[in-house]
Every structure is written in structure tokens, then in C-alpha cells.
Image (cartoon, rainbow, N blue to C red):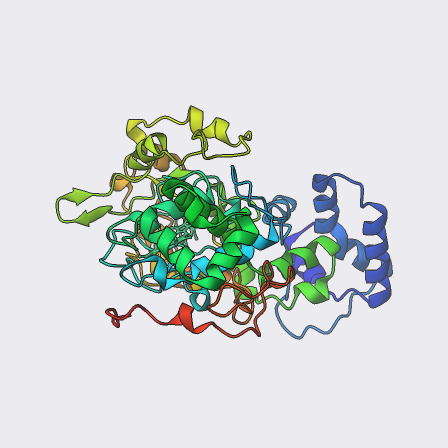
Amino acid sequence: MSRGAARRARRALVPPRAALAVVGLFAAAALASVTGLMVMLALAPRTGHAATGVVTAPDVSAPTVLDFTPEELQRIQSHGPWPLPLPRDAGNALSGRTEAQALGRALFFERGLSPAGVSCAHCHDPARAFTDGRARSVGVAELDRNAPTLLDAAHERWLGWDGAADSLWGQSIRPLLDAREMASSPAHLKRTVASQPPLAAAWRRTFGQDAVTQGDEAVLVGVAQAMGAWVATLASGRTPFDDFRDALARGDRAAAARYPLAAQRGLRLFVGRGNCHLCHVGPRFTHGEFADIGLPFFVRPGVVDPGRHGGIEALKASPYNLLSRWALPRDDESVKTRHVHAEHRHFGEFKVPSLRGVADTAPYMHDGQLPTLQAVVRHYSRLDPDRLHADGQQLLRPLGLMAQEEDDLVTFLRTLSPKGPARPSMALGSGAGQAVPPSAGPSLNPAAPRPPSATGPPARSSTR
Ligand code: HEC
Ligand code: HEC
């Protein structure tokens, strides 16, 4: 097709009846391979146009849906579907059990777990998409890294920016014990659970016995596994990008046209010249592994964050990894932990983060060094190739984007966040005793109020 013809085809409006016929065609082709379907999608508007012979659509403005190539359409579809079913927390027998989720939720907001009054929610605030809005988190003291969101964390194969944990519950143990985070101890956890009647009752419902009758370490793991069971239910909602992607798949141009053109241009860069989709793969926009993107990784002058290298060493040494006696049931997930080994190239690599909800989780990167999405895009546009490891180099080069293109990419990234405030249902308040309706736990309910315990920092910190 000549460029002129393509432009005309784009401008032509498909009459409703023809559109319906096209939709019918898709229904018939529902069993066709994705590739085949995508090729049809690419052709659909033009086919409808040619079949009806309509050529005099009002030429009001530029096209409202870009003329994506079949390859682009296929890549766009690969970033769905959404939502995905939530996996269970690996090696956590409590995962999926309602009473454990209720206990885990109560524990998550419980400042009493820490002698310093720091709860998990202090750094993972539901009102901030389970982050704290800081570059680096502050518990009892400042940490070296940025707090990631917990939404969709159940999908992560490795937890933390360095993947030092291989399950949600395993990841939950470190902040409990870390002197800079919650600075707690197994004995303190046990006392807290036993001394608060609602927590004690929720504990009994979950474990069938009182915490005081269990060993200290069993209580530590029990707290972490209940939290893991709850965190595994936190899912992010659908986004404008999801609506666009599905509209394209249905061949529904009217719905697709509601997605801003700037976002479409940004999307085209993302799956094309920008090469972003090579690492930010699939429905969650990550392959879940680690990479180097040429950012400095100093903790402070002269001290570097070893990133993935240190993460693998910590994981292998952890008494709470999926190969440990606490991981039950022992499932296939543990195989990856057995086979991962630290190599030199892992130095300074960090986890490729999911980009879902990314507009809600500034500042960015493992240590929050980039304040805005604009700054992130500028980094990829102008990055210094000398900074890259040999591995990153193959995928990354300075993109040299024009200002307009940088803006388009940012506009696209913003469409990966759910519309409106995304907050999980918080019907529980700060107490542990109330029952959690099964429907309230896992879902996101924008209307639900924030519990007071989730909002306030502990007494000493008022800087954020
Ligand atoms: C002082 C702040 C702070 C507190 C308190 C805290 N976290 Fe975190 N959390 C972080 C930071 C920072 C990271 C990134 C850690 C890393 O890369 O090593 C993180 C990472 C995580 C992750 C991994 C997410 C991912 O996608 O990789 C999970 C899960 C998590 N925290 C759960 C919890 C739970 C449960 C608690 C309470 C027991 C908790 N956190 C308490 C700051 C905190
Ligand atoms: C080589 C793999 C790779 C490619 C290609 C890549 N990224 Fe990333 N991306 C990463 C890694 C790794 C991080 C985290 C780096 C860190 O924390 O030090 C990241 C972080 C980000 C973040 C910050 C997210 C957050 O929560 O902090 C955004 C936004 C982002 N990338 C967008 C993009 C865009 C847009 C492109 C294309 C222009 C792109 N990425 C290309 C690997 C990649």
C-alpha cells in the first residue's frame, strides 16, 4: 500500500456495520494463532474500508489510532492480559488461607512488632502504592535502597532489588530483624503476638495453638509466612494501556482511539527503537531477572552496592530460603535457588522492575536516584555507554531521543498506572481480631479508608 493510501485508510472511519462484521470475523478467528490474529488486526481497518467503499470520511484531524505494524501489534499484545491470576507464595503452606491472610494483614500494620515502633506499612504505605515516596527508606535508620511497591509482588521470582530472597515470606524476615529497619527479635515478636488479644486470637485461628507454646524461630517464620500470605493477595488494577491493548485485540478502533496519541507514540518507541521491551517484558513489563543499565551504584563515596552479586550470596546463605527446612511444601520453585550462582557479571546488576503502577512509585531505581519518569527517560536517551557492563551493552545504547519523543515515552509510562487512587481494601483497621471477608482481602477497593496505623510514621520521623 502506498503511503498516501495508508494515510487515507487511517483517516477513514469504519462504519458501524462494517465494524461489526470485522468483530464477527474476529470471533470466528478466535482460535487462530496470536500471530495470525495480529496480522488480521493490522489489516482489519483497511479491509473494512475497502469492503464498503467508503472514502469520504470527514477529514477532521490526524489519525486517532496509529497504523501499528503486525510486529508492533504482536509486541503490544505480549504486555497482557491483565489481570493475571495471582500465584501463591512459594514454600508457604499458609498462602491462600483466609485466616492467615487476616493475621498477616494485621501484623503488617502492627508497630508493636518493632521495639522502635516501625511497621511494615511505614515503608510500604498502601496510600503510596505500598512505597514510602523516599529515595531511600528510613526505619530505625536510613537504608541503602528504595522501597519497591508490594502490588503484584507475588509474581516476582526473586525479591528485593538484588534478589536476596526467593519468597515473600523469606523477604519479610530481614526487615523484622534488621537493626536499621524494625530492629526486632523473635522473642519480641512472640511477646507482642501473645500480649495483644486480637493478635493472639488471629494467631490461634491460623496455627491452632498459642504463640507461647511455639519456639521463637517458629514464631518468627510464622509471622513472616502470615505476612507473605497477605502480601501475595495484593494486585494492581487495570490501566488505560490495558484498555487500549484489549481494544486493539478486539479490533475496536473507537475504544482504541480513547488512548492518547502521545501515549501511542510512546508505546511505539517502547516496543521499537527504545528496546525497552527487551527487559521490561510481558504483562508485568519485566522478565524478573537482573541487568545493568549504566547507573552509578554508590551507597556513599567509595562504597558500592554489589547488587545481584551480594543478593545471590545472601540468598544462598539464608536459613530461610526455599531450600531450608522452613520452606513447605517444597515445590519446584526451589530448583532455581539451587542452581543460581554468583558470577562477576552480577556486580552492580539490579532487578528489572515491573513498570505497572510506575507513575505512583517515584522516585526511581534501586536507590531512588532519579526523581521523575522524565529523568528516567532522559537517562535512557543519553546514557553513557562506557558505564555499561558487557551484558547491558548488547541491549542498551543512548537513544538520542528528541524532546517530543521523551515526552511521549513518559506519557506512555503514565498509562501503566490504574486510573484513580489504587488502594487495597483496608476494612480491618489496626486491630487483628476482626474477620476479613474473603472478598475484601485480595481486591483493590479505591473507596476504602486508610487505617490510621498505615499513615503515620513512627514517633521520631517526620521528615517525609
Ligand atoms: C525501613 C523500611 C522498610 C520496612 C520497615 C519494611 N520494608 Fe520491605 N522493603 C524495603 C526496601 C528498601 C526494600 C528493597 C530491599 C532490597 O532491595 O534489599 C523492600 C523490599 C520488600 C519486598 C520485596 C518486593 C520486591 O518486589 O522485590 C517485600 C515483599 C517487602 N519488602 C515486604 C516487607 C514486609 C512484609 C515488611 C514488614 C515485615 C517490610 N517489607 C518492612 C523497605 C522496608
Ligand atoms: C537491559 C535491560 C533494560 C532495558 C533495555 C530497559 N530497562 Fe528500564 N530498568 C532496567 C533495570 C535493571 C532497572 C533498575 C535499575 C536500578 O535500579 O539500578 C530499570 C528501571 C526502569 C525504571 C524505573 C522503575 C522503578 O520502579 O524504579 C523505568 C521507568 C524504566 N526502567 C523504563 C525503561 C524504559 C522506558 C526503557 C526503554 C527506553 C527501559 N527501561 C529499558 C532494565 C532495563
Q: Can residue 427 be seen in this view?
A: yes
Q: Residue furthest front?
A: 213
Rendered location of residue 45, percent (x, y): 75, 57
Q: Where is residue 144 in the image (x, y as percent from the top left)?
A: 25, 51
- In this view, the residue in front, 266 or 207, is 207
| Residue 454 x, y percent position in the rendering | 41, 68
Task: Name, please, the residue furthest toward the left.
Answer: 302
Q: In which quarter of the image is residue 148?
A: bottom left
Left or right? Give the position of 203 relative to 454. Answer: right
Q: Can residue 362 be seen in this view?
A: no
Answer with left or right where residue 386 lies relative to residue 422: left
Look at the picture and state if 35 lies above or below 448: above
In the shown orientation, is residue 31 left or right of residue 76? Answer: right
Q: Nearer the viewer, residue 54 or 214?
A: 214
Q: Position of residue 258 (x, y in %)?
A: 64, 68
Is 176 positioned to the left or the right of 254 in the image?
Answer: left
Q: Residue at coordinates 34% horizontally, 40% vertically from top-left? A: 292
Find residue 371 and report its image quarter. Answer: bottom left
Give the residue at x 64% y 55%.
245
Q: Quadrant of the C terminus?
A: bottom left
Name the one closer to the observer, 169 or 408: 169
Front residue of 217 and 340: 217
